[in-house]
Image (cartoon, rainbow, N blue to C red):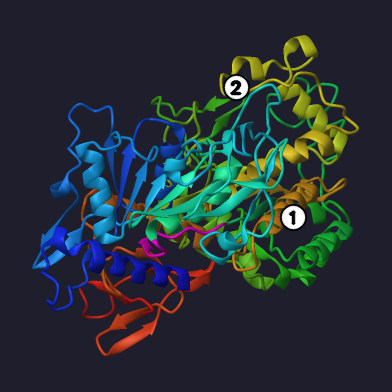
């Protein structure tokens, strides 16, 4: 963070030395120029290529306001002095705190627009990111023919340099691996080059087929300007970009910006205390499900955790430093208990260790809470009333499912948050194609029970939305299936879904344009560990490092028998901790905190999109105004204070070497003001 302060002082020096004539602030010998106003907004010049699109997505995902100029838009504004700067109440104003360009000179070297942009950057000390360019002296690098290299980076490992770790990439510990998901496809091309004078490499790689190391990301300081030069291609979904994106944005904004970015991973384990039906590897369906031909629930043994499984879960949590959310059905557990000698060693062990988990209401018996299902046909349909209207589960029945489970939790001393709910199969919410609207009785039942956050399936509804006075919390389904307890069952069902009919599968992967078929079926003895675990861990890690708080969900069956979930979680946690420094922990929030985060984000993005946010810094003072009631996300250096009417108070919490928080103006204040460290 000291580096950010140094950069601001450097910018002030540039202003004093090179910008006085441009700003008309006086001749030599005049009094010191006032600090300029720097608006907290980024200018993005977009040529349509994936690197610029990736950085733009990172800005939006973080919550940083930006203005985009499309290069190929004939009606775009001209980049000139008036577009970039002006004066407000006698104070020179830079309208953008940073500039993202597709390369070092997209308007053409020496052109009027390029000259105006470079003059602006020198005058106000504004940094520029070159989203992707080649290695050449104009960006401070030798040509690759001078001891460098160019080619595919797929599967190679880059490292953060000492200078990078001391600066904006200090949140990283381990090597940064470039994806190589398709050996026959080039996924990332790059130029590996030796720095020249004025260039500081932040991320480098051993020169392939050569000696020494060459830069992939570095800062080029020249002519009173600073450029972050990126010499590899990428898109917003690739892991190497996701890992490095934070550093790129912090360099661009000098560590002071609206928005915040953290890494999140929460895991819900559904159906705790209830048994789950088992996949039939002969019939390729799940007996007990209405669409399993000949399936009446007989012939397979339901999957349910044992007391030993519960003991292992508690031990795993302690060893991994990670808390699971147990999403429980007490009524289903009581039914199982009554059918098994009125003894339940699983429940006893879980309750003995109850303080080690977070507990989430999953309704008492896991009943379907949407329309009344008519399962006489496949697929099922909604039953109809005599007048032809849809027949729905009643408000009273929904409320009983919620309250009975919550009351059981209170009786047994569980740390259940009344405001959180996960309905069975996310029922009650719309379920296409059969039920295109929410059960109209759901909203009232949620309100009756004080529910503010009800889970939804991210694969169906990725955006948070209202369900009466409650809001949804989208959850990612994990490809560790609820109806499998062993590795062989898991691989068998995976093969059925993801292999072609010619290979003995269902062919669903052939019919779904968003799916890809396996080249050949997985081995049922090794396929889970060798293929499915790495695939699912990579997917989950991708969500975790994308500032995405939405939880993942699996089922209690996956903590039983072969304990299928743990290898996935172990790989996610190990890969994360190998990449990130201790100052960037993996956040593990509960459902209500996730819902609140998503709510704040939606309110903030709406205010930004509506143009109702104003934010700027003058010297060490940051001022932000937004519509009343809007929670404002801010990231700033360590040492930043929040101003009150009578002084200052602490601001934010530490993360990745900075402070960040959702905050609002203090009492009787109409604007949020912060004081940065001098």
Find numbered disc 2 in the image and state the secondary structure of the residue it sits on: loop
Residue at 17% x, 44% y: name it: 80
In terms of sequence position, does the residue under pointer 1 or pointer 2 come before the other? 2
Q: Is residue 258 magenta?
A: yes
x and y percentages locating residue 99 in the rendered image: 33, 49
Q: Which residue in the rendered view is the most extreme toward the top?
A: 502
Across the whole image, how many numbered discs are drawn on residues? 2
21 vs 501: above or below? below
**Residue nearest the viewer, comparing 172 with 545:** 172
Find numbered disc 1 in the image and state the secondary structure of the residue it sits on: helix
Which quadrant would residue 52 be assigned to in this image? Answer: top left
Q: Is residue 301 visible?
A: yes
In the visual, does 513 lie left or right of 309?
left
Q: Is residue 367 visible?
A: no
Residue, disc 1: 574
257 vs 182: above or below? below
Residue, disc 2: 379
Which quadrant would residue 284 be assigned to in this image? Answer: top right
Badge 2 density bin: few <14, some 14–19, many ≥20, Cα 10 Å: few
Residue 327 has which mark?
Answer: none
Q: Nearer the viewer, mark 1 or mark 2?
A: 1
Q: Quadrant of the C terminus?
A: bottom left
**Residue nearest the viewer, comparing 319 with 41:** 41
Q: CA distance from mark 1 to mark 2?
A: 41 Å
Which residue range is magenta in the image? 254-263
x and y percentages locating residue 397 in the rendered image: 53, 49
Which is the main secondary structure of the residues drawn in magenta?
Answer: loop
Residue at 40% x, 72% y: name it: 5
**Residue nearest the viewer, comparing 180 with 216:** 216
In the visual, does 222 lie left or right of 278?
left
Residue at 81% x, 45% y: name it: 564
């Amino acid at each position: 963070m000291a580096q950010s302060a140094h950069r601001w002082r450097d910018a002030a020096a540039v202003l004093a030395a090179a910008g006085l004539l441009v700003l008309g602030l006086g001749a030599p010998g005049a009094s010191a120029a006032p600090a300029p106003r720097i608006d907290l907004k980024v200018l993005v010049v977009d040529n349509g290529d994936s690197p610029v699109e990736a950085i733009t997505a990172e800005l939006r995902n973080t919550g940083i306001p930006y203005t985009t100029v499309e290069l190929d838009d004939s009606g775009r504004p001209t980049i000139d002095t008036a577009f970039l700067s002006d004066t407000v109440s006698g104070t020179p104003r830079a309208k953008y705190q940073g500039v993202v360009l597709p390369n070092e000179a997209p308007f053409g070297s020496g052109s009027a627009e390029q000259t105006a942009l470079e003059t602006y950057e020198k005058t106000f000390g504004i940094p520029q990111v070159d989203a992707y360019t080649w290695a050449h002296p104009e960006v401070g690098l030798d040509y690759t023919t001078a001891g460098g290299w160019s080619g595919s980076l797929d599967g190679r490992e880059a490292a953060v340099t000492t200078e990078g770790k001391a600066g904006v990439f200090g949140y990283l510990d381990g090597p940064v691996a470039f994806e190589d998901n398709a050996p026959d496809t080039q996924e990332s091309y790059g130029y590996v080059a030796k720095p020249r004078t004025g260039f500081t490499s932040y991320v480098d790689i051993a020169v392939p087929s050569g000696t020494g190391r060459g830069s992939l990301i570095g800062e080029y300081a020249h002519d009173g300007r600073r450029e972050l030069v990126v010499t590899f291609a990428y898109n917003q979904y690739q892991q190497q970009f996701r890992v490095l994106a934070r550093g790129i944005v912090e360099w661009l904004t000098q560590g002071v910006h609206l928005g915040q970015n953290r890494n999140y991973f929460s895991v819900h384990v559904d159906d705790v205390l209830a048994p789950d039906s088992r996949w039939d590897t002969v019939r390729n369906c799940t007996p007990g499900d209405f669409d399993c031909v000949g399936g009446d629930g007989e012939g397979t043994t339901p999957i349910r955790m044992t007391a030993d499984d519960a003991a292992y879960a508690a031990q795993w949590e302690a060893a991994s430093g990670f808390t699971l959310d147990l999403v429980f059905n007490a009524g289903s557990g009581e039914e199982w208990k009554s059918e098994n000698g009125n003894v339940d060693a699983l429940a006893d062990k879980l309750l003995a260790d109850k303080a080690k988990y977070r507990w989430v209401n999953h309704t008492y018996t896991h009943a379907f809470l949407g329309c009344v299902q008519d399962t006489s046909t496949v697929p099922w349909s909604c039953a109809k009333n005599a007048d032809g209207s849809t027949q729905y589960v009643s408000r009273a029945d929904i409320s009983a499912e919620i309250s009975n489970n919550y009351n059981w939790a209170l009786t047994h001393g569980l740390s259940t948050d009344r405001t959180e709910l996960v309905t069975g199969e996310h029922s009650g919410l719309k379920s296409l194609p059969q039920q295109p609207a929410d059960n109209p009785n759901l909203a009232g039942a949620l309100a009756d029970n004080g529910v503010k956050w009800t889970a939804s399936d991210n694969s169906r509804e990725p955006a948070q939305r209202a369900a009466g006075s409650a809001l949804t919390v989208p959850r990612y389904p994990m490809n560790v299936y609820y109806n499998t307890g062993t590795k062989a069952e898991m691989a068998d069902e995976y093969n059925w879904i993801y292999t072609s009919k010619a290979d003995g599968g269902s062919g669903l992967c052939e019919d779904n344009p968003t799916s890809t078929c396996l080249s050949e079926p997985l081995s049922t003895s090794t396929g889970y560990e060798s293929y499915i675990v790495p695939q699912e861990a990579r997917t989950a890690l991708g969500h975790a490092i994308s500032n995405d708080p939405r939880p993942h969900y699996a089922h209690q069956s996956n903590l039983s028998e072969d304990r299928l979930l743990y290898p996935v979680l172990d790989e996610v946690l190990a890969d994360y901790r190998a990449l990130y420094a201790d100052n960037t922990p993996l956040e593990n929030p509960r459902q209500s905190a996730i819902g609140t985060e998503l709510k704040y984000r939606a309110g903030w993005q709406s205010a930004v999109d509506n143009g109702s946010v104003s934010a700027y810094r003058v010297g060490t003072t940051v001022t932000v105004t937004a519509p009343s009631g809007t929670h404002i996300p801010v990231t700033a250096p360590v040492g930043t204070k929040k101003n009150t009417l009578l002084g200052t108070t602490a601001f934010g919490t530490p993360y990745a070497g900075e402070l960040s928080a959702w905050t609002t103006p203090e009492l009787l204040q109409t604007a949020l003001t912060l004081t940065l460290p001098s």
